Image (spheres, helix red, strand yellow):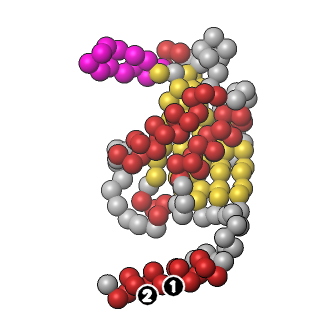
Amino acid sequence: MAVDEVIKKYFRAQTLSGTRFDKRAIDEVRPLEIEPGLLPCTHGSALFQRGLTQALTVTTLSSLADKQYLQDSLGETTKRYIHYYSAMPFSTGQTGRVGRPGRREVGHGALAEKALIPVIPSQEEFPYTIILTSEVLSQNGSSSMASTCGSTMSLMDAFLSV
């Protein structure tokens, strides 16, 4: 408890003095870097970096035959735009289980997918399946939004009008 109080007082003093824990000013944002077309043999790719958070997104275009089939109690539906999100334990400096995606990965992928649906061209305009894969390489901030921003750049690198 005593340690928590000391930490709380330190952060409060830092905030009131106008600096953050990482020595940035209150109104200063983390540096932002975007590198589209990083991977040469893909349909589209982009590396998005904000501060220490990095996300590499790859766009894959395929025929409509490769769309995803989903089935639930209401029947069967299909998706032609799919967003996969992956954040391995090394991205936070930890060790851990590597395998199928957990709830966090599924949720972040769904969030990024939902954010980009409004800018995805219609099937009539662009008759292809669009698969985005975001790999988080390092995390110290919002990795879900880093993957969303990287995905937008990757789509543009694949010459999709967003």
Residue 31, given in percent of the width and then of the height, sits at 71, 62
Residue labelled with disc 2: 6
User: Along the line of sight, which residue is nearer the eye, 112 or 95?
Assistant: 112
What is the three-letter code of the residue carrying label 1?
A: Tyr
Q: Residues within 10 Å of mark 2 (few under 14, many from 20)?
A: few
What is the three-letter code of the residue carrying label 2?
A: Val
Q: Main secondary structure of the magenta part?
A: strand
Residue 83, given in percent of the width and then of the height, sits at 51, 35
Location of residue 57 with respect to 155 vertically, above or below: below
Residue 51, given in percent of the width and then of the height, sits at 64, 63
Instruction: Evaluate whether residue 22 shows in this view.
Output: no
Q: For the C terminus, which image quadrant? A: top right
Location of residue 45 with respect to 82 vertically, above or below: below
Q: Residue furthest top?
A: 124
Residue labelled with disc 1: 10
Residue 52, given in percent of the width and then of the height, sits at 60, 64
Instruction: Evaluate whether residue 143 shows in this view.
Output: yes
Q: Residue at x 35, y 88 (%)?
A: 2
Task: Give the magenta part as a residue range.
Answer: 67-78
Which SS class for mark 2? helix
Q: Residue furthest left?
A: 73
Q: Is residue 64 left or right of residue 97?
A: right
Cβ–Cβ under 8 Å for marks 2 and 1: yes
Q: Is residue 78 left or right of residue 18?
A: left
Which SS class for mark 1? helix
Residue 124 within the segment the image draws in magenta: no
Q: For the N terminus, which image quadrant? A: bottom left
User: Along the line of sight, which residue is nearer the eye, 142 or 90?
Assistant: 142
* C-alpha distance separating marks 2 and 1: 6 Å
